[in-house]
Amino acid sequence: MKPLEFFPDARQAGPISLGWRRLLLVYALAVGMLAGSAYTMYVHFDFSHSSDTRSYLRMAKGEFRGVRITHRYRVLVPAVAATVAAPIELIYARVWPHRAASDWPLRLGFYVVNTLVLGGAGVFLFLTCLRCGASPGAAALAVAAVLSSRWAVYVAGLPLVDSLYMLVFALAFYASVSGSTAALVACIVLGPHAKESFLFLIPWLLVFGRNAGRLPLQLSLLAGSLAVAYGVRYYIDARLGAPPSESVNNALAHLENLSYSLRRMFSPKGVGELFSIFGFFSLVLLAGLQGGRAAWQRWPRHLTWACAGLVLVVLAHMLLSGDLGRMGYLAAPAFAVAFSRLITYHPWFTWLGLGNRAYADAPVA
């Protein structure tokens, strides 16, 4: 495997290589951060309060009748979780006899799959921060800030599909800053099967993903991936005898959330929910407003229109879903880049020793 290279500074003699061992270490750290806290969520969560988790558990069993139409086409994560749970179920009763007759093996399958997938998203966030000029230490701290969010624990520990959607957003942003065609292809192939709202990300990809794949390539990939997604929807609807208009009506029903989401966003409770996405790590961003002209000349570089555009895409998700915090977590790539560059370049954080001059101003491919 050829080591990944990035060019931290024109003054350096050559690129810094990130071989598979270093990337594996980053992945291990990301999974390690998630595994403990997500396990607590997996064990102690009260499923009676979450229709989402009950829907995905039923889908993992192959039971689609009665599943909410909002969830029924997101089959990839439930299918993989069921595959992982199959061998686990053979020994589960011996290891945990008090949990034998229940959905515990399936829950464990979701926990394993979601933790591993969200850890993979953390690796791409790390690489994105490096590509945007952050030092490795600052990039690692940014990943820690993202994966310690309460939503990371929620997404990794429960029978949900948000981990795959987070990976799709991480792949999209990495493709835009690195020019990686492989990341772009993976994003487009996985996106329509993660969530239907991937449609909101498509215009962003067509604009900011062009250096990873030109429009003809992107359009052909999108056509193929969306065709497969439509085939899955058609097959499920045919099994259930559901009319196509049901999906259209469900999509239009989300427009009713707009007024509710706007009112909630500007309420005290909504402000608290937004703050809780990244918690006290969000306060680091306030430092960006201080430090004078010298700070402003350095840390905001690479906070381009791509970041602003991604935030707008996430805002559309928030307003239409009504779930401000959970959807707001999708802004993690933009947050990680801003956070890591602040830690690298802002004078307030020089005492951390993470702003190595060798990593100054990495050019975006």
Image: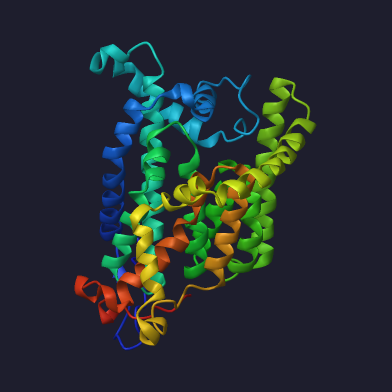
Q: Which residue is rendered at x = 49% and y = 49% of the image? A: 268
The N terminus, quarter of image: bottom left
Occupied quadrant, residue 221: bottom right
Q: Position of residue 320 (x, y in %)?
A: 64, 46
* Image height of 44 relative to 306, above or below: above
Is there any visible trace of residue 213 in the rendered image? yes
* Residue 34 % position (x, y): 31, 43
Q: Residue at x 28, y 12 (%)?
A: 98
Q: Position of residue 22 (x, y in %)?
A: 26, 60
Residue at the extreme front: 268
The front one of 254 and 38 is 254
In the foreground, 34 or 273: 273
Q: Please give left or right for residue 97 compared with residue 304 in the image.
A: left
Closer-to-camera residue (180/64): 64
Residue at 30% in and 58% down: 23
Q: Position of residue 308 (x, y in %)?
A: 55, 67
Judged left or right of residue 321, residue 159 is left
Q: Which image quarter: residue 297? A: bottom left
Question: In the rendered view, would you say 297 is above or below 123?
Answer: below
**In this rendering, position of residue 19 left or right of residue 304:** left
In depth, the one of 88 and 198 nearer the eye is 198
Picture quadrant of residue 294: bottom left
How many numbered marks does the figure carry? Answer: 0
Residue at 48% x, 25% y is 49
